[in-house]
């Protein structure tokens, strides 16, 4: 039967080429979680995430088991916090902790959405949010943060780009004692020790991008002369 | 539910018997079998039908994995759909 050839090919992919499903993501809206009181909001966020995602990990594992293909990371993505909890400028770290606690409770590897969308300009809320990001990242383990600085429609918000450098440095400094973001690696191994570590991947990527950029600018220069 | 069982490993006496014994115990029906020996290596593919009122894929997997560990074989159980989905447009 023709299917048996396909079976052997798939088995080879799984056994030899380590085919897996990198991640499965559950999207959760937090737009209905905002209250005047920060503590209440944090509790609502925690409750909603844990309620909706309580079966995420077990379901993903069950599906992976059924098909024989492992789903490596289970992840949650929520409404950008700076958007969902706008007008509140004090309790960002509280929300971050609520997200982190919820992620640990349901057992997902990552929770994303501690984010701001500032491509069209920053409000006071966004500014205070960005200030809080380094502290939030230091005090959480599984929470990820992002700041959207540009889009093809709105262009790039250079004012916000300028703030990113000090922000990244501050985050790095504050979290210098932490094991940082590498959820799929065992604890206490150096990221450089694992051959496929995120650090190396980032390095390769940077090198590649840099090389591309370099050859492009050389080409441009030679063609103009 | 249809599933495909792949058995790979060094050829010894009674591999097929042991696999089919487990299938019988779990009331899983064998619909098709293909089997060859490639350079001393036993390779068997089985298309089976699992009656979900009597057993399920994780039970079958657990039983076969236990046997695989004892006999030093590699046994995979996967839903048939995955092979169709991965190779047919």
Image (cartoon, coloured by chain):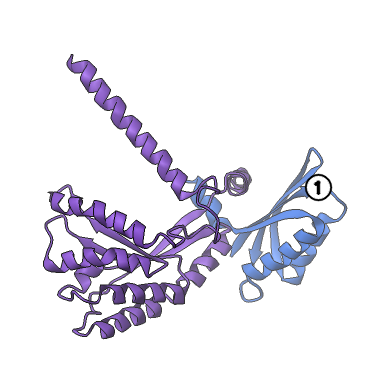
Chain colours: A purple, B blue
Which residue occupies 44% across, 44% down?
A201
Residue A40 falls in which quadrant of the image? bottom left
Examine the rendered structure and indicate whether residue A164 appears above or below residue A30: above
> Residue A93, position in %: x, y?
29, 73
Examine the rendered structure and indicate whether residue A148 appears above or below residue B51: above
Examine the rendered structure and indicate whether residue A195 appears above or below residue B73: above
Q: Secondary structure at mark 1?
A: strand
> Residue B9, position in %: x, y?
77, 49
Give the left or right position of residue B63, taking residue A112 as reference: right
Mark 1 highlights which residue?
A: B10
Which residue occupies 39% across, 72% down?
A100
Examine the rendered structure and indicate whether residue B73 appears above or below residue B67: above
Which residue occupies 18% across, 74% down?
A89
Q: Chain of mark 1?
A: B
Give the left or right position of residue B5, taking residue A19 as reference: right
- A29 or B1: nearer the eye? A29
The quadrant of the picture occupied by the C terminus of chain A is top left
Residue B21 falls in which quadrant of the image? bottom right
């Amino acid at each position: 039967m023709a299917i048996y050839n396909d079976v052997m090919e798939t088995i080879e992919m799984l056994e030899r080429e380590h085919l897996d499903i990198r991640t499965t993501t559950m999207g959760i809206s937090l737009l209905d979680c905002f209250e005047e009181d920060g503590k209440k909001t944090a509790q609502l966020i925690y409750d909603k995430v844990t309620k909706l995602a309580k079966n995420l990990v077990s379901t993903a594992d069950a599906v992976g088991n059924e098909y024989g293909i492992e789903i490596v990371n289970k992840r949650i993505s929520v409404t950008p916090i700076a958007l969902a909890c706008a007008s509140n400028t004090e309790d960002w770290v509280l929300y971050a902790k609520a997200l982190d606690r919820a992620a640990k409770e349901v057992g997902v590897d990552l929770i994303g959405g501690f984010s701001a969308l500032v491509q069209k300009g920053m409000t006071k809320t966004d500014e205070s949010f960005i200030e809080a990001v380094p502290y939030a990242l230091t005090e959480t383990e599984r929470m990820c943060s992002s700041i959207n600085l540009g889009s093809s429609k709105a262009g790039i918000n250079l004012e916000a780009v300028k703030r990113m450098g000090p922000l990244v440095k501050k985050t790095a400094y504050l979290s210098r004692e932490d094991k940082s973001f590498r959820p799929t690696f065992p604890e206490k191994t150096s990221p450089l020790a694992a051959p496929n570590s995120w650090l190396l991947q980032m390095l390769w990527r940077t090198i590649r991008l840099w090389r591309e950029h370099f050859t492009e600018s050389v080409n441009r220069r030679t063609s103009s002369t | 539910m249809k599933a495909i069982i792949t058995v790979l490993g060094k050829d010894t006496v009674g591999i097929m018997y042991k696999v089919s014994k487990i299938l019988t115990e779990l009331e899983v029906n064998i619909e098709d079998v293909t089997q060859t020996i490639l350079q001393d290596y036993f390779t068997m593919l089985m298309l089976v039908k699992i009656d979900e009122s009597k057993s399920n894929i994780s039970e079958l997997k657990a039983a076969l994995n236990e046997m695989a560990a004892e006999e030093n074989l590699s046994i995979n159980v996967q839903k048939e759909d995955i092979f169709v989905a991965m190779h047919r447009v």
